[in-house]
Amino acid sequence: MNWYPFLTGLSAPQQLHIPDGFLSAPVAIIGWVLAVLTIAYALRQTREQLGERQIPLLGVLAAFIFAAQAINFPVAGGTSGHLLGGALAAIVLGPWAAVLVMTAVIALQGLLFQDGGLLVMGWNIINMGILTAFTGYLIYLAIKRIGGSEQRSILIGGAIGAWLSVEVGASATAIQLALSGTTPLNIGLPAMFGVHALIGIGEALITVGALALILRSRPDLLRQGEQAGGTASAAWVAGGLLISLIVAIFSFAASGSPDGLERVAEDHGFIGSALDPVYHILPDYTIPFIPNETVSGIVAVVLGTLVVFGVAMMIGRMIKTERAESHS
């Protein structure tokens, strides 16, 4: 069967993050400072907390989150949403390691695919990575302490934590837009909160699905999640990467509707503030020399999944090396 005509009518993955132009320069610079300080502290914390045999999980989670973020799912009103993944990463690895995972994903999206501006990358990392990781993790821990470590508590904690993490990230974005003079808080906050309340349901469902799979295949990864525990065999890592690549291939099924922030920007008249990227490498999740948009998008997402896996693994090896040097 010739799949080319079928693929011609499908969409490439959509851009996901705050572009340059939505935030003022002073607000954007503050975001960079806060992000760099948090990432530096996360590196220090994970050096002591992350066990050597958990380091490969950095790569697996980064690959899965990158691939899953490329699949926008439709929500009401001609809007789409996508996984953030910070809560999932924090539940499995702990919040500080999750910060590194999310930084690898978001930085690669901005630098290689021009998804999200360079000047505002600090806030993209904070909103989508740091705030989501800690919000999801703290809610998950609270529910586990109330309900125990049974599967039901883990899944309920993951669902609520994931949903609320989306709302916290969206609300933070609305505050940054208001501080930048882009849109008033009394307009931007309800709009962002409302549309992301629906998107958060998708986040919760994906997070619960991933946690259920881990509980079935490797429950030890979650039993010690508070200390980033568990072990990661080569077979498990290979299987996780394979799942991530399969998810990446299905990026052709992404909804073509605008995501939550883009929808709010269109509805409230500041979409025109977005600036074009200062350079292009693989813009809009495409490979320039592949003419078919959908095939180009699939190849780009598969490539990105492999690259972010490698980057996260390099971060893990760096942590391992620094820990060995500090103990020598």
Image: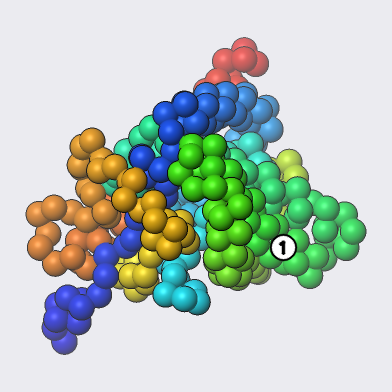
Relative to 220, 59 lies left or right: left
Q: Could you tell me if residue 149 is visible in this image?
A: yes
Residue, x 56% and y 55% (percent of image)?
187
Q: Secondary structure at mark 1?
A: helix
The residue that label 1 is drawn on is: 160
- Residue 264 image offset from top left, x and y in percent: 46, 59
Question: Closest to the observer: 127 or 186?
Answer: 186
Question: Closest to the observer: 267 or 310?
Answer: 267
Q: Residue furthest top?
A: 328
Task: Quadrant for the C terminus, please.
Answer: top right
Q: Could you tell me if residue 243 is visible in this image?
A: no
- Residue 281 image offset from top left, x and y in percent: 20, 42
Relative to 146, 96 lies left or right: left
Residue 274 vertical position relative to residue 198 in the rendered view, above or below: above
Res 117 → quadrant: top left
Q: Residue furthest bottom?
A: 1
Image colouring: rainbow
Question: Closest to the observer: 300 or 11?
Answer: 11
For label 1, the crowd category at 10 Å Cα-Cα, with few meaning under 14, some 14 to 19 and many 20 or more, is many
Res 292 → quadrant: bottom left
Residue, x 50% and y 43% (percent of image)?
177
Residue 320 vertical position relative to residue 204 in the rendered view, above or below: above
Residue, x 33% and y 70% (percent of image)?
256
Q: Give the amino acid type for the residue marked by disc 1 in the picture.
A: Ile
